């Protein structure tokens, strides 16, 4: 059974829309679904009973995420055919032996997940054309190749994994206990050699061998070269792994897999555990059918849409050399002090004022808030208290600031002396005339200035093409949209 839903569905999706075939959940499946319902990424990492999950970006699984960041919620009186609510989490995973769940981006209507593929390509520096197939299993497998370089880089930043390994030798340089039985068998009559074994602290161990086997497997694929060639750090790390494993032997792959079935618990090499999971998932892809736990290296793969959208925008800014500081709320990095006696907050992107003017209108600071959520319009139901927070696009489309977002942006403008604060969010576009442009809440001739210290607020909505016939066509539209978006940002700097 396949349950397929979109992310950010705040109105319950009926069972009949989520499941293509006429079927219902049995009692065991209902129990599994109820137990998983409402689980956040943080809760998932703490409750191992659900199995091993890969979460990207990986830091999201280890930080304090709010309870609202649930994967999905099932609602309804008839639990054999429940309805579903979703948030920012996308992913592919199993529940039990025969229930698969697919949560895909609401910006993809073709069923090919082009938007998720594209963001992962940009963030992970991997150029892979997704397979044009209707197989959910192949779709799941495609995403593993995007993640491997990122997990490899994270692990190698901690150094090449070292461990004690027992080595057996038969030579004249005795460095350990003698293996009497082997010595008699190999060295009779005496030939000047001694059979012995020793413990060595080396990089050529089962974990790095697993990584090496994964690298060689990916290289053997038709698109394997593109996984490692687009990023200098990835190339260097691949070379380091190859150099660290001189005893690599392709015929020992099954043995290496069997040796790495237990988690890595080393207190320093913490990044190697998620890398081990993804290596097993790639090497054992034929066993990724949703069966027994012993046949599944991982139970699923999840993507934090909000983090991925933020990282995607950071990549776009980096490529176009836009000088914005990218703070990290989850990593508590590059924050902004709001009060003299404390209070550090983390705007997604910002540029501090360099003019030191006493009036915000004369400053050149900028605050940019990345939001991966539904943009409200005046035709939709408003939140109480937000009646006066509309912004209108030149073509008549009205976007709607949520009150909390607006107040947050005004606070950052005040603290950073920013003349402009911009909320950037994607929106689904089915109009071909919009794909090469961006939508925004106002044009420059109709700026809306805040009272008090001044400054202007704006919404930039980036259109996501939902009618592309191929991934190449989708990528071309996205590249043009990015150029127009960067042009607009440069006008604000």
Image (spheres, rainbow, N blue to C red):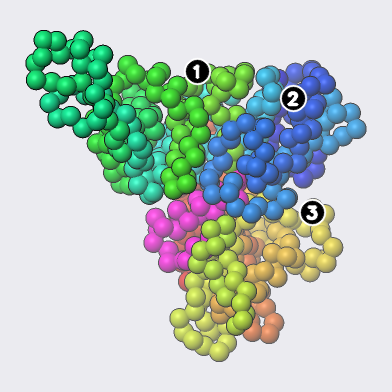
Looking at the image, which is closer to me, 365 or 99? 99
Q: Is residue 317 magenta?
A: yes
In this rendering, position of residue 225 left or right of residue 484: left
Q: Secondary structure at mark 2?
A: loop
Residue at 69 percent across and 48 percent down: it is 69
Residue 5 on image: x %, y %: 70, 33
In this rendering, position of residue 425 left or right of residue 326: right
- Write down the residue under mark 1: 286
Q: Is residue 49 magenta?
A: no
Where, by quadrant of the figure, is residue 3 drawn? top right
- Write down the residue under mark 2: 19
**Is residue 127 depicted above or below 281 in this figure?**
below
Residue 379: numbered disc: 3
Looking at the image, which is closer to me, 109 or 402? 402
Mark in the foreground, 3 or 1: 1
**Is residue 267 depicted above or below 300 in this figure?**
below
Q: Compare marks 1 and 2 and give the one earlier in the sequence.
A: 2
In this rendering, position of residue 392 left or right of residue 201: right
Residue at 61 percent across and 36 percent down: it is 91
**Is residue 347 depicted above or below 18 in this figure?**
below
Query: Where are the magenta residues, as a range?
Result: 304-328
Q: Secondary structure at mark 3?
A: loop
- Mark 1 closeness class: few <14, some 14–19, many ≥20 residues within 10 Å: few
- Mark 2 closeness class: few <14, some 14–19, many ≥20 residues within 10 Å: some
């Amino acid at each position: 059974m396949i349950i397929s839903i979109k992310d950010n569905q705040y109105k319950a999706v009926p069972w009949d829309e989520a499941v293509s075939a006429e079927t219902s959940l049995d009692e065991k499946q209902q129990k599994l679904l109820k137990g998983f319902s409402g689980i956040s990424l943080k809760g998932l990492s703490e409750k191992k009973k659900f199995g091993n999950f890969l979460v990207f970006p990986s830091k999201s699984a280890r930080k304090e995420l709010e309870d609202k960041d649930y994967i999905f919620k099932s609602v309804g009186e008839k639990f054999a055919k429940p309805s579903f609510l979703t948030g920012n989490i996308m992913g592919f995973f199993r529940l039990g032996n025969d229930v698969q769940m697919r949560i895909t981006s609401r910006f993809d209507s073709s069923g090919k997940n082009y938007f998720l593929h594209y963001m992962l390509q940009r963030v992970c520096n991997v150029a892979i054309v997704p397979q044009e197939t209707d197989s959910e299993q192949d779709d799941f497998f495609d995403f593993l190749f995007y993640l491997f370089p990122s997990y490899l880089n994270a692990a190698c930043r901690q150094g090449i994994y070292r461990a004690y390994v027992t080595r057996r030798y038969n030579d004249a340089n005795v460095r350990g206990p003698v293996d009497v039985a082997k010595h008699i068998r190999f060295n009779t009559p005496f030939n000047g050699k001694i059979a012995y074994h020793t413990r060595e602290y080396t990089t050529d161990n089962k974990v790095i061998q697993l990584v090496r086997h994964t690298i060689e497997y990916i290289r053997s694929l038709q698109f394997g070269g593109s996984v490692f060639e687009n990023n200098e750090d990835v190339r260097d790390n691949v070379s380091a792994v190859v150099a660290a494993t001189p005893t690599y032997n392709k015929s020992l792959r099954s043995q290496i897999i069997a040796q790495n079935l237990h988690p890595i618990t080393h207190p320093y090499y913490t990044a190697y555990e998620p890398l081990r999971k993804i290596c097993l998932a790639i090497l054992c892809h034929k066993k990724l059918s949703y069966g027994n736990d012993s046949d599944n290296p991982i139970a699923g793969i999840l993507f934090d849409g909000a983090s991925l959208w933020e990282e995607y925008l950071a990549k776009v800014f980096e490529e176009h050399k836009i000088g914005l500081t990218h703070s990290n709320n989850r990593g508590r990095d590059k924050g902004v002090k709001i009060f003299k006696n404390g209070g550090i907050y983390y705007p997604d992107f910002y540029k501090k004022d360099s003019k030191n003017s006493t009036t915000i209108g004369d400053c050149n600071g900028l605050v940019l808030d990345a939001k991966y959520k539904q943009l409200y319009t005046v035709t939709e139901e408003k939140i109480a208290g937000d009646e006066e927070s509309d912004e209108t696009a030149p073509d008549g489309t009205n976007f709607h600031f949520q009150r909390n977002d607006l107040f947050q942006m005004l606070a950052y403008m005040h603290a950073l002396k920013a003349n402009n604060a911009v909320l950037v969010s994607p929106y689904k576009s089915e109009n071909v005339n919009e794909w090469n442009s961006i939508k925004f809440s106002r044009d420059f001739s109709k700026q809306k200035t805040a009272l008090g210290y001044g400054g202007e607020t704006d919404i930039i909505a980036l259109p996501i093409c939902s009618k592309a016939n191929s991934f190449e066509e989708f990528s071309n539209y996205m590249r043009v949209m990015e150029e127009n978006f960067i042009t607009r940002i440069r006008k604000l700097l």
